[in-house]
């Protein structure tokens, strides 16, 4: 059985991600990115082993892409698509555009 995040940690991560989404939708890209990074920092060591890291890296990469920070976007998308453990890589449309 796979190890899961505690309910409180998962709830905090999803709340921060939602705040980041709302800020990005409002055009506050930098503030939204900070919420995603804050959420990413809540993950335990070896954070890429957690599913949440995948969608947080994609969200951060999308922000960098929209800000024309293509090098940073690439690094985020690259981190998002790297399978860890028994996980499968996830590809967003932006990640496919940049990585592939």
Image: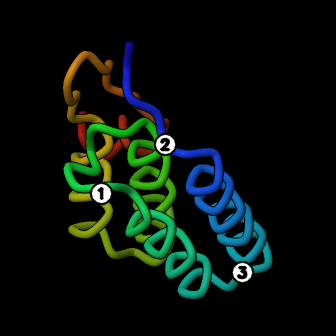
- Could you say where residue 70 lies in the image, as x and y percent from the top left? 29, 67
As drawn, the label of residue 59 is: none
Label 3 environment density (alpha carbons within 10 Å; few <14, some 14–19, many ≥20): few
Evaluate if marks 2 and 1 touch, with contact meaning CB atoms under 8 Å apart.
no
Q: Disc 1 versus disc 3: distance between alpha carbons?
A: 20 Å
Give the residue at mark 3: 27
In the figure, 35 relative to 96: above or below?
below
Closer to us: 97 or 19: 19
Q: Nearer the viewer, mark 2 or mark 3?
A: 2
Closer to us: 26 or 8: 8
2 or 1: tag closer to the N-terminus: 2
As drawn, the label of residue 5 is: 2
Label 1 environment density (alpha carbons within 10 Å; few <14, some 14–19, many ≥20): many
Label 2 environment density (alpha carbons within 10 Å; few <14, some 14–19, many ≥20): some
Element type at marker 2?
loop
Closer to us: 48 or 98: 48
Left/right of residue 23 with respect to residue 49 in the rendered view: right
In the figure, 57 relative to 87: above or below?
below
In the figure, 55 relative to 43: above or below?
above
- Could you say where residue 37 lies in the image, as x and y percent from the top left? 44, 72
Closer to us: 16 or 1: 1
Element type at marker 3?
loop
As drawn, the label of residue 76 is: 1
1 or 3: tag closer to the N-terminus: 3
- Could you say where residue 13 lies in the image, as x and y percent from the top left? 58, 59
Element type at marker 1?
helix
Q: Residue at x 48, y 59 (%)?
A: 62
Q: Residue at x 48, y 75 (%)?
A: 38
Evaluate if marks 1 and 3 touch, with contact meaning CB atoms under 8 Å apart.
no
């Amino acid at each position: 059985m796979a190890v899961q995040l505690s309910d409180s940690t998962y709830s905090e991560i999803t709340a921060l991600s939602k705040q980041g989404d709302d800020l990005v939708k409002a055009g506050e890209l930098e503030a939204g990115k900070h919420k995603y990074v804050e959420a990413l920092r809540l993950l335990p060591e070896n954070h890429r082993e957690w599913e949440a890291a995948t969608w947080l890296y994609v969200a951060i990469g999308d922000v960098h892409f929209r800000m024309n920070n293509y090098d940073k976007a690439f690094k985020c998308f690259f981190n998002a698509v790297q399978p860890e453990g028994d996980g499968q890589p996830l590809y967003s449309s932006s990640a496919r555009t940049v990585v592939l």
